[in-house]
Image (cartoon, rainbow, N blue to C red):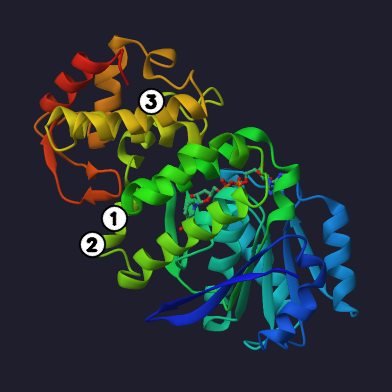
Amino acid sequence: MNIKKILVNTLDGKYPILIGKNITPKLKNILDRNNIFSTKILLVIDNKVPSAIIKKIKKSFKKKIFLIYLTSNERNKSQKNVDKIINILLKNKFNRNDCLISIGGGIIGDLSAYAASIFKRGLIYVSVPTTLLAQVDSSIGGKTGINSKYGKNLIGSFYQPKLVVSDISFLKSLPRREILCGYAEIFKHSIISDKLFFYFLDKNVKKILHLKSPFIEKSIYKSCIIKKNVVEKDFKEKNLRKILNFGHTFGHAYESALGYSSKLNHGEAVILGISSAAKFSQHIKMLNKNDYNLISDHIKKINSQLKLKNFFKNGNIKKITSFMSNDKKNSDEKINLILIKKVGKVNIHHKFNLKKIESFFLNYFNVI
Ligand SMILES: NC(=O)c1ccc[n+]([C@@H]2O[C@H](COP(=O)([O-])OP(=O)(O)OC[C@H]3O[C@@H](n4cnc5c(N)ncnc54)[C@H](O)[C@@H]3O)[C@@H](O)[C@H]2O)c1
């Protein structure tokens, strides 16, 4: 079996990420090889993950294991489902050496990791990410969380898994727009820290989006290395880790201004956000025209219809900027943006007032 291994080493603990194809049917052997010999195992499973793979995983354990299936949506990333998981653990007398394994995307991963972190102050947690976004982003770095009626990801903890097992075979059943969500983060990782990786993506974008080997494996591997390097230096998001938000301030405002409509999903909003942050960087003369063109040409290759004017009208600008500032009343509010100096290098702290951002939108609305 060809398995690539990355070791993540944070102040909070060390753990391997294993990346390979069709590796989860032998999950029990993988746990053994990584010294995880828990007596009791609970699998928290996203119910859209194909049952054929789950069957093989269950069979690999050769003993009774506990299962809970959940539907993955932001409403279900809730305290109610954390309680459900914890009640199974308590009822079946799990202890801290027993193990919780999540098999799903970022929603099931964030929720399960949070439950694992608070159960008896932490039991062994293993992550099996099944979406591209979870494989390149949410399974690395130890951020766990759930939503509340006051907003997304407001309750959570930092808790590292003992092991991450990324099996590319899961991606075969993933809808195309979900693949794009993961690709948006891969693209972002290249822009914030690795121009050569960007050129690799630019040359192979179609093959990667169609999950062709070895292009998809290399994209996941490189992307995990970039995120690992950032979180190792700043695992509690005090400073450097903020560069991972590149494109997200604009992107979140686009999603919010459309009321999280299915017209524009998270990944598409992030790509539009990357485009906007790059144009803004060029507008303030931080980024040169050549590098801006590299980024905007790449976005055309991903999806030529991903343009601001296909989702918004000029009249929506104030709504977008108010979401960016998070305060609809205060027009003097300053907004922090992560901007880009060149492909492969970003800049963290830039405060701009709303007027400047509004005038940027007025100038470039039809360009981004
Ligand atoms: N912890 C972090 O650092 C971090 C980072 C980024 C995002 N997140 C969180 O991740 C979440 C988004 O994650 P996501 O994009 O993976 O979304 P998701 O978990 O909702 O999965 C997307 C969709 O794919 C389905 N799915 C999952 N695996 C599948 C498979 N193998 N085949 C077919 N369908 C499958 C799910 O049921 C869901 O409908 C958000 O809640 C976000 O807050 C966390």
67 vs 196, nearest the viewer: 196
Residue located at (69% from left, 36% from top): 175
Check disc 3: other Cα within 10 Å, few if <14, some if 14-19, many if 20+: many
Q: Secondary structure at mark 2?
A: loop
| Residue 82 in view | yes
Residue 244 position (above or below residue 91): above
- Residue found at x 46% / y 22%: 306
What is the C-alpha distance between the residues marked 2 and 1? 6 Å
Residues tagged 3 and 1 counted as in contact (Cβ below 8 A)? no
From the top left corner, tell me how far across and down residue 78 is, in percent.
Answer: 56, 54
In the rendered image, residue 42, in percent from the top left (x then y), is placed at: 74, 72
Residue 145 visible (yes or no): no
What residue type is disc 3 on? Ala
Tag 2: amino acid: Asn
Q: Residue at x 52, y 55 (%)?
A: 136
Residue denoted by label 2? 239
| First along the sequence among labels 2 and 3 | 2
Q: What residue is disc 3 on?
A: 257
Q: Are marks 2 and 1 in contact (CB under 8 Å)?
A: yes
Whole-Å distance between the Cαs marked 2 and 3? 28 Å
Q: Quadrant of the N terminus?
A: bottom right
User: Which comes before the other along the chain, label 3 or label 1?
Assistant: 1
- How far apart are the alpha carbons under marks 3 and 1? 23 Å
Q: Which residue is mark 1?
A: 242
- Front residue (pair 8, 361): 8
